[in-house]
């Protein structure tokens, strides 16, 4: 029986290993993590992450061939294949601060593997890592090998949150990079055999190590670039009276472009896009390619511009001040169908409004109050460290209250901001909301979920990203 161990029971490691266990009954899969509370949650009825379909997959194989354990060393020692899916935060100090990946957790994982291993192992990079990380990991492992042989593979994960199980069941492609040596090829084949239990062979792409590592960064950069492109267009649409939804529909009809990932928004978030692009930028700079670095940097700059522009729109519409005004925030997660808030644009928008002394009343169907308070009090990039290493949240952020209902959030609010496209926000009783707000009552839709015309008929002043502006907003131009 092949034994797999995965280091890191997070958004990537947990669902990926659960699906491998489900699809490969002959393989024993153990997911380990230094966080005892995370492992306890994986072993309970309340899994630590919310992902449609995940509960069923975990329940059907947990205890059979899927296990969650905090006995990291034992299970690493016993495994044939070790996946590493630990955090790779952006460095906050020293060389490459603000851009380069901090490989502290990765390096200590590699050293631990070398310490405890008594049999040959395939070590698989699952976390997104800078190009050539495998080389560094290989060096750590071979210099400490005590006769044990290692093969390093890069097998980046392309799942998106909210559709993780679907993406894992039917991936567009599985990418496996390895050394172009007989041992390297054997290792690639061993991992390919795992995925071949359910993924058609033509979808399993085998490449060299560096291509696999770079492809992951490139794929995320291309996706984020599409969003920044359409968001840049949204600003021009507002200035000219075009409608960004019509523009992206027309553009996406070109089969060479395609319609996916062209929704204008308040900005992209999530644990990968910004981090991976910063990483790419850093690698370009280190390789003497400043023009290429600046090209990709612009994708992040437009994203920051979009978030700022949204805050400025709110403040300028409300007579250039939100000081002391209550603003309802609907949605805090970085997208719908997830409770994940990593790099969510809501953090920047809320901090921008708090900077102008607004009072916020926040509602999100999946995000806890503790998480929201922690996010709003954390420094940039601190989120990507295991919870116990994160700074403690202050006992209260006084200007922020978190409520469990959209109507409660909106009661008495001067403005309502939609920051996540949760389906339930489409069908709220906006008349009821309007009646409970001081006038003029504003809606700022950062995800284009409401029908602006209908809301205007109720009496709202509506701002929707990239849509023709109300005359009110035209009279109060936002300076970005
Ligand atoms: C993680 C990284 O954040 C991301 O950069 C990478 O591309 C893929 O792996 P994700 O699974 O979403 O993505 O992160 P997270 O949910 O934070 O899970 C990482 C887990 O690793 C945490 O549960 C953490 O406790 C664990 N961990 C971290 C270890 O077990 N050992 C360590 O040394 C560090
Ligand atoms: C992304 C990649 O899609 C995935 O392949 C990779 O493995 C990890 O990073 P994820 O971060 O889970 O996945 O979410 P994704 O669906 O890509 O959305 C990222 C952000 O872009 C979200 O904030 C989303 O709201 C935003 N977005 C997406 C838009 O603003 N407009 C769009 O058209 C699409």
Image (spheres, rainbow, N blue to C red):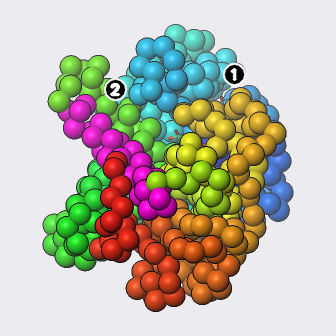
Left or right: residue 379 versus residue 218 is right
Left or right: residue 467 versus residue 366 is left
Which residue bears the numbered disc 2? Answer: 282
Of residues 410 and 104, the one nearer the viewer is 410
Residue 95 sits above or below residue 351 on the image: above
Of residues 193 and 474, the one nearer the viewer is 474
Give SS at disc 2: helix
**Residue located at (62% from left, 64% from top):** 328
Would residue 71 be seen by someone viewing this image from the given angle?
yes
Of residues 62 and 286, the one nearer the viewer is 286
Place of residue 197 in the rendered image (x, y in percent of width and height, measured from the top left): 51, 61
C-beta proximity under 8 Å, tags 1 and 2: no
Give SS at disc 1: helix
Q: Earlier in the sequence, mark 1 or mark 2?
A: 1
Q: Quadrant of residue 390?
A: top right
**Residue located at (41% from left, 69% from top):** 463
Place of residue 136 in the rendered image (x, y in percent of width and height, measured from the top left): 44, 19
User: Is 315 one of the magenta-colored residues?
Assistant: yes
Place of residue 246 in the rendered image (x, y in percent of width and height, measured from the top left): 25, 77
User: Is 124 one of the magenta-colored residues?
Assistant: no
Task: Give the number of the mark in front: 1 or 2.
Answer: 2
Q: CA distance from mark 1 to mark 2?
A: 33 Å
Q: Which residues are magenta?
A: 292-319
Which residue bears the numbered disc 1? Answer: 116
């Amino acid at each position: 029986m092949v034994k797999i161990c995965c280091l890191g029971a997070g958004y990537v490691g947990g669902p990926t290993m659960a699906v491998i266990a489900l699809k490969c009954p002959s393989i024993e899969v153990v997911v380990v993590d230094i966080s005892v509370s995370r492992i306890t949650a994986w072993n309970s009825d309340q899994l630590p992450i919310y992902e449609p379909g995940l509960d069923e997959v975990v329940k059907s194989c947990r205890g059979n061939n899927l296990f969650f354990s905090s006995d990291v060393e034992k299970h690493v020692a016993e495994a044939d294949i070790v996946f590493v899916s630990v955090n790779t935060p952006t460095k906050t100090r020293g060389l490459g601060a603000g851009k380069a990946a901090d490989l502290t957790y990765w390096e200590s994982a590699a050293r631990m593997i070398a310490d405890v291993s008594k049999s040959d192992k395939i070590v698989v990079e699952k976390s997104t890592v800078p190009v050539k990380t495998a080389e560094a990991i290989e060096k750590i492992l071979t210099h400490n090998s005590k006769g044990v042989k290692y093969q390093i593979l890069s097998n980046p994960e392309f799942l998106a949150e909210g559709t993780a199980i679907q993406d894992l069941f039917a991936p567009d492609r599985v990418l496996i990079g390895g050394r172009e040596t007989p041992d390297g090829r054997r290792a690639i084949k061993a991992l390919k055999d795992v995925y071949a239990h359910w993924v058609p062979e033509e979808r399993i792409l085998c490449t060299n190590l560096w291509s696999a590592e770079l492809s992951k960064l490139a794929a995320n950069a291309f996706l984020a670039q599409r969003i920044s492109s359409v968001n840049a267009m949204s600003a021009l649409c507002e200035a000219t009276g075009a409608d960004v939804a019509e523009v992206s529909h027309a553009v996406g009809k070109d089969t060479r472009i395609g319609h996916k990932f062209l929704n204008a928004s308040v900005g992209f978030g999530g644990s990968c896009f910004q981090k991976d692009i910063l990483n790419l930028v850093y690698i370009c700079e280190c390789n003497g390619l400043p023009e290429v670095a600046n090209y990709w940097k612009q994708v992040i700059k437009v994203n920051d511009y979009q978030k700022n522009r949204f805050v400025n729109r709110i403040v300028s519409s409300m007579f250039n001040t939100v000081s002391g005004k209550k603003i309802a925030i609907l949605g805090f997660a970085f997208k719908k169908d997830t409770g994940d808030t990593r790099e969510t644009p809501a953090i920047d928008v809320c901090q921008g409004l708090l900077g102008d002394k607004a009072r916020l009343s926040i509602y999100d169907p999946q995000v806890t109050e503790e998480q929201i308070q922690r996010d709003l009090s954390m420094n940039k990039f601190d989120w990507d460290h295991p919870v116990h290493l994160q700074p403690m949240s202050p006992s209260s952020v006084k200007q922020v209250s978190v409520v469990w209902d959209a109507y409660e959030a909106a009661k008495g609010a001067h403005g309502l901001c939609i920051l996540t496209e949760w389906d339930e926000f489409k069908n709220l009783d906006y008349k009821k909301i309007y009646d409970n707000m001081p006038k003029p009552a504003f809606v700022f839709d950062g995800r284009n979920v409401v029908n602006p015309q209908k809301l205007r008929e109720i009496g709202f002043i509506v701002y929707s990203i990239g849509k023709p502006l109300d005359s009110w907003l035209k009279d109060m131009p936002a300076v970005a």
